Amino acid sequence: MALAAEKKTATGQDLQSFLRFLEESHPDEVIHVSKEIDPVFEATAALWRLENERRFPAVVFDNIKGSSMPCVTNVHASFPRLAMAIGLPIDATPRDFVLEYMKREENPIPPKLVSREEAPCKEVILTGDDVDLTIFPSLKYHELDSGQVDPGFEPWQGRYWTLAYETMKDPDTDVPNVGIYRLQVKSKNKVGIQISETAHGHYIMQKNLKRGQPTQMAVFNGVHPAVELGCLSFTGIDVDEFSIAGAMLGEPLELVKCETIDVEVPAWAEIVLECEIHPTEREPEAPFGEYPGTYGPERNNPVVYVKAITMRKNAHYHSSFVGHRDNLLLSGVTRNSQIYKSCRVASGAVKAVYVPPSGRSRYICYVQMEKLIEGDPKNAAMGAFTADPFLKYVVVVDDDVDITNDSEVLHAIATRVRWDYDAFEVTYSRGSPLDPASYDPAGGSHLVTKVGIDATRKANYPLEISTPGVADIDLSDVFGDDWQRFRRD
Ligand SMILES: Cc1cc2nc3c(=O)[nH]c(=O)nc-3n(C[C@H](O)[C@H](O)[C@H](O)COP(=O)(O)O)c2cc1C
Ligand SMILES: [Mn+2]
């Protein structure tokens, strides 16, 4: 195992080396909790309280009741950590991030196969009766999280994996696919899965279903966040997300073959579950608290059997705090590059785009442009809608508006929009089936109304107030050296 311990890049390809990097270089970005914490609600409640205080460190729960494994969470809850994951400075702007992410997405680096001796995820191998999902500190996040479990497994009702990265091969092309589809623990070796109809994973499962065969699928959990950001890239079904993960790392992602199925997984993953999605078996899964901040309904979802567990000796289980920043930011930042590209096709005057957490990092997009001709902002808004079906409101503003600041955008809407001229509506269009404001939320309708808003200044916009000399004022000179005692609003 000598090779396995070596670092391949400044921060390596694994979650633990990224945590070490934070501990050494940015110690306030991460906290270890040694107190015993209940996996049922208590971990989530603690993160929620922290969020109420507007604080978002990565949290490692070292002592989750019932498990000997640490539970790492909230890693993606702060944008600067995501920027640092792809090698940007801690103060990088969302625009810097989009441009860097886009550049890397356009220059994929194919993965590299390594031997099992070189793969830390093979340090422990459990097969047959040794497969036991109860060793992992999976959490129960929300009060009504549920789903059917096997008889005798009731204490595990509502325990979910929210950072399960699944990989499976397209039977037509053999191209691997990667996405996150949550898992519901049902027994020692059985989980439920929710793969949305729009995910590539769903197409692959359906293709196998038509052939009457199970889908071989590996789950990997706990990787470097650069790998996560690459795996969640908005690519076509024929693009292998592992090559985008390599681009985010700046080196080939190391993959290793699974023991019991014909699928490859990241060699530096903390935990791997080698699985088969049963071709026909379905069981009730959910309700489960989802990203919009509401529960997704119970559904008859596929059943998955775990054939083997492979993992590191000191494996760290990785969880995402779903429905909160940790989940929202990770989903949000990976959408921006496609939206930016599409908006730039619609109008060359577009300078930046931002999908704010206030819109659940899915439903709202702000577009900043240096408008040269009237009408152009609406075309830019249409470009955003084309790129991302989940968007419902696109607001286009002038280039002096800070699009990472909701208040500035609202100011632009309040003072620069005549609704009948400047907004357009598209009814009966495709959105998210989890949208609480879809035409039939209880029925899981994906039909929504979309609104584009041109909030740029129009012709004859009155002169805006200004005062000469603001930038030159020395506050200490006027208000005294202790002017900072005044409470900040
Ligand atoms: C924390 C997190 C949880 C997610 N959970 C699910 C899920 O349970 N089911 C699902 O279909 N998509 C889920 N997603 C979204 C998909 O992983 C994402 O759309 C992915 O790009 C789909 O990949 P694919 O189209 O290649 O299959 C989640 C995303 C994040 C960031
Ligand atoms: Mn895909």
Image: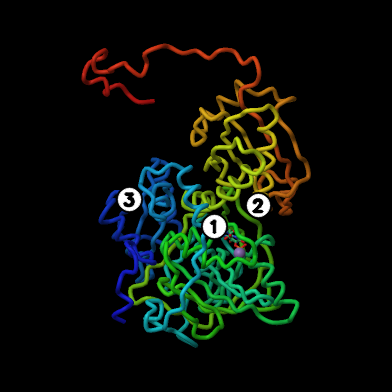
Distance from disc 2 to disc 3, alpha carbons, whole Å, reads 32 Å
Dot 3 crowding, Cα within 10 Å, few <14, some 14–19, many 20+? some
State the residue position of label 3.
Answer: 29
- What secondary structure is found at the residue carrying circle 3? helix
The residue shown at (69%, 78%) is 279
State the residue position of label 1.
Answer: 106
- What secondary structure is found at the residue carrying circle 1? loop
**On-image quarter of the N terminus:** bottom left
Q: Are marks 2 and 3 in contact (CB under 8 Å)?
A: no
Instruction: Work out whether 146 lies above or below 455.
Output: below
Instruction: Work out whether 160 lies above or below 99.
Output: below
What amino acid type should be assigned to the residue bearing mark 2? Leu
Q: Position of residue 403 (x, y in %)?
A: 52, 35
State the residue position of label 2.
Answer: 434
Q: Are marks 2 and 1 in contact (CB under 8 Å)?
A: no
Distance from disc 2 to disc 1, alpha carbons, whole Å, reads 30 Å
What amino acid type should be assigned to the residue bearing mark 1? Glu
Q: Is residue 132 left or right of residue 458?
A: left
Q: Position of residue 49 (x, y in %)?
A: 40, 46
